[in-house]
Image (tube, rainbow, N blue to C red):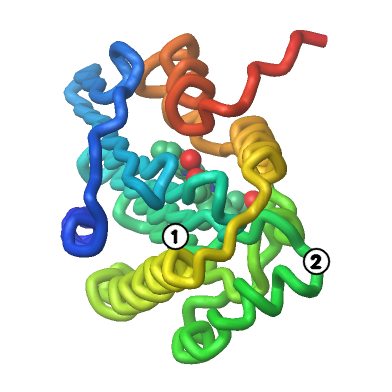
Amino acid sequence: MYRPFLTHLEQELNRRFTLEPLPIPEGLAYNHTARAGKEATIQSWAYSSPDFRKIRYTYIDAGDQAQVFNGVLYPHYHYDLPVLGLDLLAFGNKKFLTVIDIQPLYQDVDYQARYVAPMQPIYERYGDLAQKFEMRFYDANIYFSKYLLFARTEPELIQTRVFAAYQDYLALYLEMLETARATGRRADPAQIQQAHRDYDQYSAERDPAIGLFTTYWGKEWAERFVYDFLFDLAVVPAPI
Ligand code: BLA
């Protein structure tokens, strides 16, 4: 269902950047399960480049039960740019969720003007994909922009509207990166590293996917996948 999204991401990244594979910890790049006739496969990819510290994306194919394409692009620490967050989900052939955002590291006014305001023209073209429902797991005021696309759609819209929005957000994000490179504007890497740590910690602790991973691949694998791959700057919270 979301394969064209994955292919498009790979094409755009390879067209504009020089990617090097990033090692994925043992056992986490691929997993498969077949229980009671239900099959599920999870596969992940990770790269770095001179502009990106980490690019990672994951495809879950559990047939009609679940199709997920999830990814995060993290620029290098000398850029204070947002991260690109992608979460495209289909459950039971009846619930289709789209989350696409250029996720701000900070919420201050200057940062918003620099990195969030440019999203507005694109956002306005996709008003139908900006549905104002409450978040249940995350806080919409932290690490989300006001131009987040968050929608529950009809499946017919995925290869059309959702794909178009995805291409536009990705293009804008990659342009932001190329502009930052061209202007030579550099951030304090120690400060940005801390911001990436905070983002990973926040995301690891709230990620509603842990239940899904546990269902198919068990609790131990799920924890490792979240803390050693998805959000590997996060530390497992000490038990209370
Ligand atoms: C929601 N994301 C979800 C849900 C699941 C996942 C199962 C709950 C769906 C529901 O409402 O039933 C799944 N999350 C995943 C998977 C991975 C993951 C499979 O990290 C990893 C492979 N989530 C992100 C990123 C963003 C994001 C990068 O991982 C940013 C764009 C957003 N996911 C996001 C949001 C919701 C969501 C905003 C709704 C959560 C809420 O209501 O609070």
- Between circles 2 and 1, the one closer to the viewer is 2
Q: Quadrant of the C terminus?
A: top right
* Residue designated by label 1: 97
Callout 1: CB less than 8 Å from ligand 1: yes
Any mark on residue 111, and which? none
Q: Nearer the viewer, residue 103 or 35?
A: 103
Q: Mark 2 — residue? A: 108
Residue at 67 percent across and 54 percent down: it is: 105
Query: Which residue corresponds to the image point at 47% horizontal and 10% vertical from the top-left?
Result: 220
| Image vertical order of residue 37 relative to residue 7, above or below | above
Residue 153 visible, this angle: no
In the image, 165: left or right of 191?
left
Q: Residue at x 30, y 23 (%)?
A: 23
63 or 226, which is in the foreground? Answer: 226
Q: Secondary structure at mark 2?
A: loop
Horizontal side of residue 3 vs 198, given as left or right: left
Within 8 Å: ligand 1 and the Cβ of disc 2?
Answer: no
User: Neighbour class for label 2 at 10 Å: few (<14), some, many (≥20)?
Assistant: few
Q: Position of residue 129 (x, y in %)?
A: 48, 77
| Image-quadrant location for residue 125 | bottom left
Location of residue 152 in the rendering, given as x and y in whole percent from the top left corner? 47, 67
Amino acid type, mark 1: Leu
